[in-house]
Amino acid sequence: MGRPTWAEINLDALAHNLHVIRERAGAKVCVMAAVKANAYGHGAVECARRLEAEGTDWFGVALPEEGIELRRAGITRPILGLGGFWKGQEAACLEQRLTPVVYRLDMIESLDRAAREARAIADVHVKIDTGMGRLGVRADQVSEFAQSAKRFTNIRIDGLMTHLAAADDETKADFTNDQLLSFQNAVRIFRENGFAPKFIHAANSAATFAHARDGENLVRPGGTLYGFTRDVLPANVERPPLRPVMSLHSRIMLLKKVPRGEQLGYGCTFETKRDSLIATLPIGYDDGYRRALSNRGRVIVRGEFAPVVGRVSMDLTLVDVTEVAGASHNDEVILLGKAGKLSISAEEIGAMMKTISYEITCGISARVPRIYTSDQEGVM
Ligand SMILES: *Cc1c(COP(=O)(O)O)cnc(C)c1O
């Protein structure tokens, strides 16, 4: 069995979230599940398999490498490479049926060449930068880009997309609406140039729940699939009934009585204010239980909160279980997740560290095994 530190990924919760999102998006809108970055730390292959079985239309990955991993695992639905591709990956994109996002003409050119050699037509989605300032053809260059793209005979521009910078912030609704208008204008320009893109998409999780879709027929949720709401959706949107998918667990490996007035951990940053019962946990910042949680985080043991005391170190963390009745060696500890009425969410841990839930689950390292569970059976 080894070290008792693990993340549980509840695939029934993931499936439930997909259905909540699908209902929200409406029957005519395709759902592209963002499973980049190992499905935000949840395990891309296992999550994609379940999502595919539940009827996800598309998958979104960041790198072609991530798409190839899904193909090798048997995923057959279309995969969009959100970050495009790098030189030398054109043939792999074609062979593995990955649809790359493109935002430079030379990408289309090199993919067109590879497609001609393979006697194939390569599908791409063109990304328009309507205000994010990151990837995409600038809105003021769309006309020129569309005209130049006409000459590539082995490319099919099958989708047009943009990405919203602040759909999660209702105070920036004007900015978001400007982005959407600019995108609609870009779509019109492509159509005027004779293109007939099938997929028109702009919405991440926040926009899926907070904004109307005008002419769009696909949404690209990520965070909401994994059950994040509080730092994903604008405050003025009613919370959909999403469920967290990941929980993080460990066990007490050593328990000791420590008299009042002793210092604990690196840097002696904590001093016991009373005779205390201190538990050592086999998890640390190398696992993604971040050092910023030193003297701040809390865990759940036997249905009670227990505070992190002293510095979180690389492999070990101390918690004060003085007030946990019956605390014992080998007790299960929940660092993220629910136990009875108590819960610790990724949003809450993120807020404590001035970041977002995404960075918390993405940060749970490969050293932590992912155990896939369901509602009925517990651990599968
Ligand atoms: C990651 C990503 C998404 C998903 O965003 P969420 O906020 O997690 O819903 C959508 N679109 C693009 C282009 C992305 O990179």
Image (cartoon, rainbow, N blue to C red):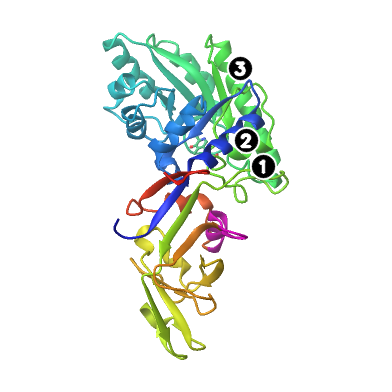
Q: Residues within 10 Å of mark 3 (few under 14, many from 20)?
A: few
| 312 displayed left or right of 168 | left
Few, some or many C-alpha atoms within 10 Å of disc 1 (few <14, some 14-19, many ≥20)? some
Query: In the depicted view, which residue is nearer to us: 23 or 99?
Result: 23
Q: Earlier in the sequence, mark 2 or mark 1?
A: 2
Q: Which is more N-terminal, label 3 or label 2?
A: 2
Which secondary structure lies at badge 2? helix
Q: Which mark is residue 20?
A: 2
Residue where numbered disc 1 is placed: 240
SS class of the residue under badge 3?
helix
Query: Given the image, on which type of amino acid does mark 3 rest?
Result: Arg
Which residue, given by chain and number where applicable, does mark 3 sit on? 188
Under mark 2, the amino acid is: Val
Quarter placement of the N terminus: bottom left
Residue 159 x %, y %: 51, 20
Q: Say if mark 2 contacts mark 1, CB within 8 Å.
A: yes
Quadrant placement of the C terminus = top left
The x and y percentages for residue 167 are 63, 40
Region of the chain picked out in magenta, as a range: 339-352
